[in-house]
Image (cartoon, rainbow, N blue to C red):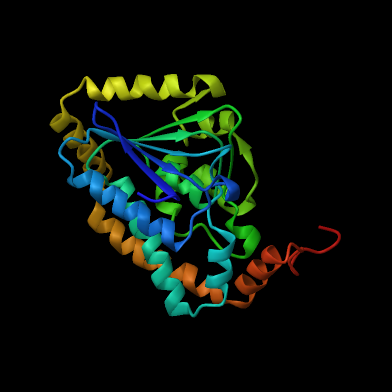
Amino acid sequence: MTDSLIYAKNERGVVTLTLNRPSVHNAFGDELIQQMISALEQANDDDDVRLLVITGNGKSFSAGADLNWMRKMAAASAEENEQDALRLAQMLRRLNYHSRPTIARINGSAFGGGLGLAACCDIAIATDQAQFALTEVRLGLVPATISPYVFRRIGETQARRYFLTAERFSAEKALQLGLVHEVVEEDQLDQAVDRQVSHILAAGPLAVRHSKKLVFHAANTDVTSQRQIDQDNARLIARLRVSVEGQEGLTAFLEKRTPSWVRENG
């Protein structure tokens, strides 16, 4: 589709969406978010598409928010921040509730929104070198927009730790938490993804789509209820971005200094 997002469909009807910004660890901003939304819509409208694979180019899956995007939003109003958060929420919602099965091919580290992107996929397979973190509180923010999807993967007990600490954890830990389904060595990643692709392609396409809907119905997490959650979370993150603490956290991060709330004695 663009240099930042590569849309490729093979003869089996498998679409691979590749975040293609390796120089910034595949971080995304408003432009890439809109490109992802368009790509997801394109795949949804194509009757030949059987499933989607989401991955990143280079050594990272996605580092989350782009620095230039963060800089722009730090200077924006609460209303502008809310609209911005709603666009991210729309992308995540489109991915999570996509009519086709989705596989996250986690080729490297996934932080913040990048972790949320992986959590929205039906199946997640990571290289053993990948690292994960929910880094938002280090900036005086919260993982609001991605929280429903991450929470459903790791549960309340683990969310109450990792939402608060922003600590990094390994691919093996992500496996233990239920964030990913499989961890493999780097040279085995494509083979592991292909195995899952083959399983899905061997099943009835309509049955697969209805099975996915069945999960959401059983869990009472349909797209309608998700829209209301997204509205509430967008308002929350907007308030925090323009708050004194949020402004300090973002400014400190952009200036590569320690935020004022960190004291010398820890």
The quadrant holding residue 152 is top left
Residue 127 percent coordinates (x, y):
54, 28
Specify the quadrant that holds the C terminus.
bottom right
Can residue 221 be seen?
A: no
Report the front residue among 116 and 160.
116
Image coordinates of residue 262 in percent, x first then y, are: 77, 63
Q: Residue 220, position in %: x, y?
A: 26, 47
Q: Give the total number of marks visible in the rendering.
A: 0
Between 10 and 266, the one lying in front of the other is: 10
192 is higher (above) or lower (below) than 77: above
| Left or right side of 185 for 197 | left
Determine the residue positioned at 44% across, 53% down: 146
Which residue is painted at 51% across and 34% down in the image? 177
The residue sitting at the front extreme is 3
Q: Is residue 89 visible?
A: yes
Give the percent coordinates (x, y) of residue 31.
42, 61
Name the residue at the right extreme: 265
On the rendered structure, is 60 left or right of 12?
Answer: right
Above or below 58: residue 246: below
Nearer to us in this view, 192 or 224: 192
Q: Report the residue at 50% width, 19% height from top.
A: 188
Image point (76%, 63%), residue name: 258
123 vs 261, left or right, is left
* For residue 105, above or below residue 41: above
Quarter-wise, where is residue 11 in the image?
A: top left
